[in-house]
Amino acid sequence: MAKEHKKHADPKRLRSLLKLIKGKKILVVGDVGVDSYMMGKVERISPEAPVPVIHVQEERLKLGLAANVADNIQALGAHSLLVGVIGKDKAAEDMVKLLRDARARVGHLVEEPYRKTILKTRMVAQNQQLIRIDHESQREISQHTEDKVIAELRRLVPEADAIILEDYAKGMVTPTVAKTLFKLAKKHKKIVAVDPNLKTPSSLYKGATLLTPNTGEAEKLSGTKINCEASLKKAGHKILKATNAPAVIITRGKDGMAIFQKDGSVQLIPTFAKEVFDVSGAGDTVISVLTLCLSAGASLYEAAILANVAAGIEVSKPGTATVSTEEINRTL
């Protein structure tokens, strides 16, 4: 029978943890991309087809996928070491510029010339997303590129305070890359937080310290439909068993988070979101804050509380966004 623990976090202790994360180095490994937003107004229907005509008033580029995690880490006063694969195109140039603007290191990106850099373009009118256009390649990276990625991992794992693996199933996180990363992390005694993908078998994540699936990913990883508290707990424990991870945190949107640990304990945390504008990027914020806090000596519960507060702030902003320690402090 799972033990459900009810706890309270000390705000003074949480604030001290926010100070301790400053300057930490987090290795971020995974698929990287750029998010493009075209904002405007719709005032008529096209005479050519029954579709709205968007009068574009603003265009905005943001870091996406694992690059957004790196951006989150930089915004929290820490340092990101980003390992990802890009092409030789305009989107790659935009990503490098955005990373430099965020004061993040760019020298660990691996170029695969004939690969498309992931670009997601969203058309938004009157605060409503009308369509998303994706430019991407989903094939696995080449052997040559994989060797370059692994060389970066060997160089960076010893330097990092903790590691984040972001799997968007776009071809970078190959079984060899994942296995090598977990092996290096174990050798150098580094925690690895994994944001899994529902297209990837749970066996790929064996070696993770912590997994942070959302509800849909948790259902796929566990083979359990989550529709009540009992099925939620069943799914969490099945993922623990399948991956042999010490802990799993299922992020549940408006229902908050559920923490599962190997000792059988379960902790449910309600959401702190007061206003939800856009949920994109919330998972990136969660894993960034979780990992930083754990690297600073937080308990899993304390780290989850701070991550949940940060996610509540992030979803109140349009598009993928970052959160600062000052914003978290104000909310606390």
Image: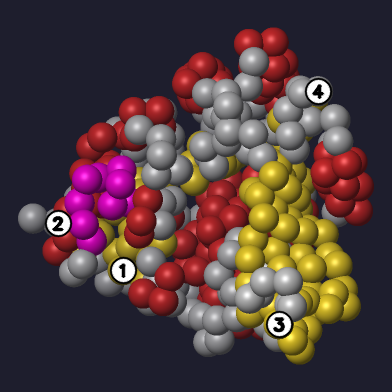
Say whether disc 4 or disc 2 marks the residue closer to the N-terminus: 2
Say whether disc 1 or disc 2 marks the residue closer to the N-terminus: 2
- Label 4 to label 2: alpha-carbon separation: 50 Å
Mark 1 is on which residue type? Leu
Residue at coordinates 74% horizontally, 78% vertically from top-left?
47
- Label 4 to label 1: alpha-carbon separation: 46 Å
Dot label at residue 268: 1
Dot label at residue 2: 2
The answer to the question of whether label 1 and label 2 lie on touching residues, with beta carbons closer than 8 A, is no
| Disc 4, SS | loop
Q: Nearer the viewer, residue 122 or 110?
A: 122
User: What is the crowding at mark 3: few (fewer than 14 residues within 10 Å), some, or many (at least 20)?
Assistant: few
Q: Which marked residue is nearer to the observer: mark 3 or mark 2? A: 3
Q: Is residue 54 left or right of residue 195?
A: right
Q: Quadrant of residue 331?
A: bottom right
The answer to the question of whether label 4 and label 1 lie on touching residues, with beta carbons closer than 8 A, is no
Q: Please name the residue that numbered disc 4 is placed on.
A: 113
Q: Nearer the viewer, residue 274 or 320?
A: 320
| Disc 1, SS | strand
User: What is the crowding at mark 2: few (fewer than 14 residues within 10 Å), some, or many (at least 20)?
Assistant: few
Q: Which marked residue is nearer to the observer: mark 3 or mark 4? A: 3
Q: In this view, does 127 lie to the left or right of 250?
A: right
Q: Please name the residue that numbered disc 3 is placed on.
A: 45
| Residue 123 position (above or below residue 100) | below
Does 29 appear in magenta? no
The answer to the question of whether label 3 and label 4 lie on touching residues, with beta carbons closer than 8 A, is no
Residue at coordinates 79% horizontally, 31% vertically from top-left?
87
Mark 4 is on which residue type? Pro
* Magenta residues (range): 218-226
